[in-house]
Amino acid sequence: LFYSGGVEPESQLHLANVLREYRVDLQSVLEEVHERGMPLTDLELRLIKSVAASRLEFVEDQLRLDGHRRMHAGPGKRILRLARSRFKRLASRLRGLTRPKIGRLQHYPPRPLLVPASYLKTEPPSPAPTISLVTPSFAQGRFLERTVYSVLGQNYPALEYFVQDGGSTDETLETLRRYDERLTGWVSEPDDGQADAINRAFVHTTGELMGWLNSDDILLPGALAYIARYFAAHPGIDVVYGNRIMIDEDDCQIGLWVLPKHDDHVLTLVDYVPQETLFWRRGIWEAVGGRVDPTFGYAMDWDLLLRFREAGATVVRLPRFLGAFRVHEQQKTSAEDALGARECAQLRIRVHGRPIPVDEIVKELRPYLRRHVVVHLWQRLADRIPRQRIPVATLPAEPWSRRRSLPAEAGGAGATRLESDASR
């Protein structure tokens, strides 16, 4: 309490003097209250007396005694104490640097969401494979436009993008009508949850590459072109995913998940794969049944990955930030932790044939987490290299996307707009 690292004894004595002046002033106020007879409760009176007469005086005395003791200590002792303090701060910083970041949803205070300018220069292969992307949505109208714009704003030339809404009554339908001409299609109708919405949406798609993007997350610039180029150059790869940026409700960056090379064994213990960056070939999708398991309310993406693995899929982690995961109070990840724990335990039993104790999971994850720490530190060093970075535009400025919405023939739940022309 009375000695903090590099605080000099002189500064400590100055603080004691300031505290004394404050205590004297407070005591004078108390005396004035007595003289004027101002109405104070017994509780307020006891509080002022306690603070003025004992607590502040005690702190002041301790500050003064410790300051005088340190001033009269030999220079060697003072240097040793300062060295110890700085060593403790350095050790604490090193522990922070070597602590795994994946699994944590916020690493630092909000800062502008920036990406390398090179992200915008990524070109799709020629010919570009069709990417079928779907967004399940319910009552996420305040974020949905940012999600949709992050997809359509990439101007990928062979995109099927379908939004399946669960009958929202917020601004969702207004947003979907504004983007009507750019979407492959959208439906707003009651469903049986997120997995059911994903399955319904994929029925309207035919693309060679597939993925889904939740209605509060976004894709980063150039992600679709980068993914398509990788699949085109590596025909033996079935599933890919990339690194993740965490953002808050205001689209500000609050953390990074930088992942090491994919580890098939780790996938059987935990799911560190950022879902918004996950894409796969339609062939492996059809090989595992062509659907997301609707019995899962939380771990449906992990279940799908494990089924891909059981079907012999080759999975690769791409060394690029592909998507941004939004952290907010209403998100499922925060609101359904108990359900998630049960479903994750169920999946481990399915794969390993037995429950896996927590200490065993921790032990098995250590090598992977050490590799993660290395790549995360490397990313931090790379971020310090001077290079052009640009802010990510999360809301559109184009006239077509901000025009006034047209009246809908059928509003509310059940509103529908389907279109088979995937080039739109």
Image (spheres, rainbow, N blue to C red):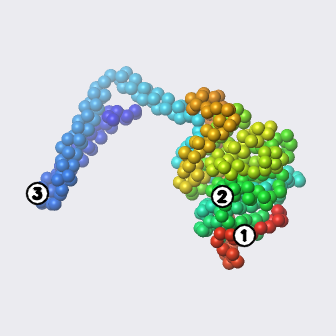
Give the CA distance from mark 3 to mark 1: 77 Å
* Mark 2 or 1: the one toward you: 2
Q: Position of residue 209 (x, y in %)?
A: 81, 51
The answer to which of 273 and 297 lies nearer the viewer is 297
Q: Name the residue beneath numbered marker 1.
A: 416
The N terminus lies in quadrant:
top left
Which residue is drawn at the image coordinates 71% and 66% (left, top)?
187
Which residue is drawn at the image coordinates 68% and 66% (left, top)?
188
In the displayed orientation, state which residue is furthest to the right. Answer: 127
Dot 1 alpha-carbon crowd within 10 angstroms: few under 14, some 14 to 19, many 20 or more:
many
Quarter assignment of residue 218: bottom right
Q: Secondary structure at mark 2?
A: loop
Q: Secondary structure at mark 3?
A: helix
Give the CA distance from mark 2 to mark 3: 72 Å
Amino acid found under the numbered disc labelled 2 = Asp
Please tell me which of labels 3 and 1 falls first in the chain: 3
Give the CA distance from mark 2 to mark 1: 18 Å
Please tell me which of labels 2 and 3 falls first in the chain: 3
Q: Position of residue 5 (x, y in %)?
A: 40, 33
Amino acid found under the numbered disc labelled 3 = Glu
* Mark 3 or 1: the one toward you: 1
Q: Horizontal placement of 394 versus 202: left or right?
A: left
> Number of labelled discs?
3
The answer to which of 298 and 424 lies nearer the viewer is 298
Task: Please say if 325 is above or below 191.
Answer: above
Which residue is drawn at the image coordinates 26% and 43% (left, top)?
19
Which residue is drawn at the image coordinates 83% and 57% (left, top)?
206
Q: Name the residue beneath numbered marker 3.
A: 35
> Does residue 296 appear in this view?
yes
> Does residue 225 appear in this view?
no
